[in-house]
Image (cartoon, rainbow, N blue to C red):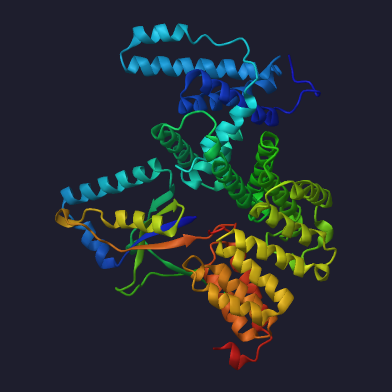
């Protein structure tokens, strides 16, 4: 079964991250790189992507004639997707363990980020026996 | 030399030869992990060269030669790495490839390989991948495609599984007589999971995944040839044949699910049903009755009913009673409840479900909610049926199944008075 592990943050979180000192930033980037490699080595990796930052985000709706109507004004409290991993595992518990590892990425001054990781199942086209 | 029309198709031939050649290479070099890589490389080479140059006189000897060469290359580079060239050179002399390897132990080899690949020390995902590659002769790319993961991920999974086998020191030999029955159950379970993965996939863009069912059936046929006296092997083959026979009828062209009761039975593969029934009939009187034979017998009763209302539910219930005595699997109890509903009415079955909810393995499972929805619908309690269909939709990991369950809920709720629906 596949799960998506999502890192979310508010605009404020993103701006704080942008101000991290070089040392902390490098440690975080190195962690993320190593983490993806570990997932590959463990044979659970399906995909990972990082997303552009919220100040580039637009909400798009279809206008009357189908033309895109964009809106980029968001409340400060809105959570944005920063990036995600998709893993193929044998149980939800295994996905939670991987998410906990991502949550333990190093943060400012080397303190653990402990960021919340949202874990959701990716629906497949077939029915797992489940038991 | 070019390919002749009379030549057998290459892919099936390669897949038949894979476990035979692997057995020979493992016996010679005693390194399962490296041998498995070497045979895969030999197979890939054959898939390129044979269509171009024609089939070699002795395809198995050809594959064995190439795999032996890969192995000696591997050992050479390994020993270079260890700075032990002189000793290795000595070793190399003893490893001259044979002109042809006799096939005396082919059958045992295939069986030993199956036991290895389905060893309980491996996770099920690894066992499935390794079985498909080492015994089924599929390429890593094909397996990755079937399971919708990147090829590198599948390669890593296979290589970790082999590492696991190496670390556990599992010998390349048949398990002891005491172990054998239990280990065979593990092999059958892996084959059953491969079958299910293919069978329960929707058609359409996932047609490649349906091949997994055919591969599972092919491997089960091989096991049956190797273990003709095991009644459960025959039971599993019959179960696969009788289930797969309904494939064309179980989804629409768009991949939407159609329940058994609404399937167009003229689309069922009646030849395959006949074969499944024949396998089962030949097996049942012969020995110990096991869970696969019972499930096959249940599938046969469904398959033999010309119309859904002709289904012999009392007999299905009797078989589920037997099955429940044999298996602690709560899914069996859940399926039995449906048979109880058909024989004794939905109220009786709903009482059984209340007890099943206590089972932690089932409590949060979508199937429990889906069956409850179905039983409530049969009982005429449409309002609660809608609620449970929707609860099941929220819990399933399958998109076609979620669409199906939501459609059930929508169909019922459109008939409900609005006030009730809003609850």
Does A114 appear above or below B347?
Answer: above
Does B385 appear above or below B314?
Answer: below
Query: Relative to B370, is A70 on the left or the right?
Result: left
Residue positioned 52% across, 71% down in the render: B394
Give residue A91's quadrant in the image.
bottom left
Give residue A7's quadrant in the image.
bottom left
Q: Is residue A66 visible from the viewing direction of this image?
A: no
Query: Relative to B278, is B67 on the left or the right?
Result: left
Q: Which of B385 and B229 is in front in this view?
A: B229
Residue positioned 67% across, 34% down in the render: B226
Query: Relative to A18, is B101 on the left or the right?
Result: right
Q: Is residue B105 visible from the viewing direction of this image?
A: yes
Residue A119: x and y in percent read: 40, 62
Image quarter of the N terminus of chain B = top right
Residue A21: x and y in percent read: 16, 52
Q: Nearer the viewer, residue B87 or A59?
A: B87
């Amino acid at each position: 079964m596949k799960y998506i592990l999502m890192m979310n943050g508010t605009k404020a979180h993103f701006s704080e991250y942008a101000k991290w000192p070089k040392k902390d930033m490098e440690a975080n980037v190195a962690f993320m790189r190593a983490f993806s490699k570990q997932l590959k080595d463990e044979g659970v990796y399906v995909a990972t992507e990082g997303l552009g930052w919220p100040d580039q985000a637009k909400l798009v709706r279809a206008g009357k004639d189908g033309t895109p109507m964009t809106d980029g004004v968001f409340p400060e409290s809105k959570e944005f997707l920063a990036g995600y991993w998709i893993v193929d595992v044998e149980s939800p518990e295994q996905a939670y363990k991987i998410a906990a590892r991502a949550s333990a990425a190093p943060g400012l001054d080397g303190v653990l980020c402990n960021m919340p990781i949202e874990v959701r199942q990716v629906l497949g086209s077939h029915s797992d026996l489940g038991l | 030399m070019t390919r002749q029309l009379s030549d057998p198709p290459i892919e099936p031939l390669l897949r038949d030869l894979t476990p035979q050649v692997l057995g020979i290479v493992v016996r010679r070099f005693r390194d399962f992990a490296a041998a498995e890589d070497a045979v895969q490389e030999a197979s890939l080479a054959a898939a390129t060269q044979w269509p171009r140059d024609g089939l070699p006189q002795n395809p198995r000897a050809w594959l064995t030669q190439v795999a032996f060469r890969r192995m000696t290359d591997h050992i050479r580079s390994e020993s270079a790495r260890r700075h032990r060239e002189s000793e290795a050179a000595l070793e190399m002399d003893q490893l001259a490839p044979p002109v042809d390897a006799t096939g005396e132990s082919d059958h045992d080899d295939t069986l030993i390989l199956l036991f290895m690949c389905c060893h309980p020390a491996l996770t099920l995902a690894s066992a499935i991948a390794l079985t498909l590659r080492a015994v089924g002769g599929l390429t890593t790319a094909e397996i990755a495609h079937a399971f919708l993961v990147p090829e590198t991920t599948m390669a890593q999974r296979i290589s970790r599984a082999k590492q696991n086998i190496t670390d556990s020191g599992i010998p390349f030999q048949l398990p002891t007589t005491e172990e054998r029955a239990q280990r065979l159950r593990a092999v059958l379970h892996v084959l059953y999971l491969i079958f299910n993965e293919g069978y329960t996939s929707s058609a359409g863009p996932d047609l490649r995944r349906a091949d997994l069912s055919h591969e599972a059936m092919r491997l089960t046929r091989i096991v049956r040839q190797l273990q003709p006296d095991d009644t459960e092997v025959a039971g599993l083959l019959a179960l696969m044949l009788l289930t797969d026979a309904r494939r064309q009828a179980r989804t629409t062209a768009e991949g939407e699910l159609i329940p058994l009761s609404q399937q167009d039975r003229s689309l069922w593969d009646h030849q395959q049903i006949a074969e499944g029934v024949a396998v089962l009939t030949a097996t049942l009187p012969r020995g110990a009755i096991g869970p696969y034979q019972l499930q096959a017998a249940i599938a046969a009763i469904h398959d033999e009913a010309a119309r859904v209302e002709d289904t012999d539910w009392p007999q299905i219930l009797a078989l589920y009673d037997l099955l429940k005595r044999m298996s602690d699997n709560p899914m069996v109890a859940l399926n039995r409840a449906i048979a109880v509903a058909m024989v004794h009415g939905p109220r009786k079955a709903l009482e059984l479900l209340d007890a099943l909810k206590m089972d932690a393995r089932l409590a949060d499972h979508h199937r429990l909610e889906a069956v409850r929805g179905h039983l409530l619908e049969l009982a005429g309690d449409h309002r609660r049926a809608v609620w449970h269909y929707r609860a099941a939709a929220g819990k399933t990991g399958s998109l076609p199944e979620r669409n199906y369950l939501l459609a059930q809920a929508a169909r019922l709720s459109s008939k409900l008075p609005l006030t009730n629906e809003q609850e």
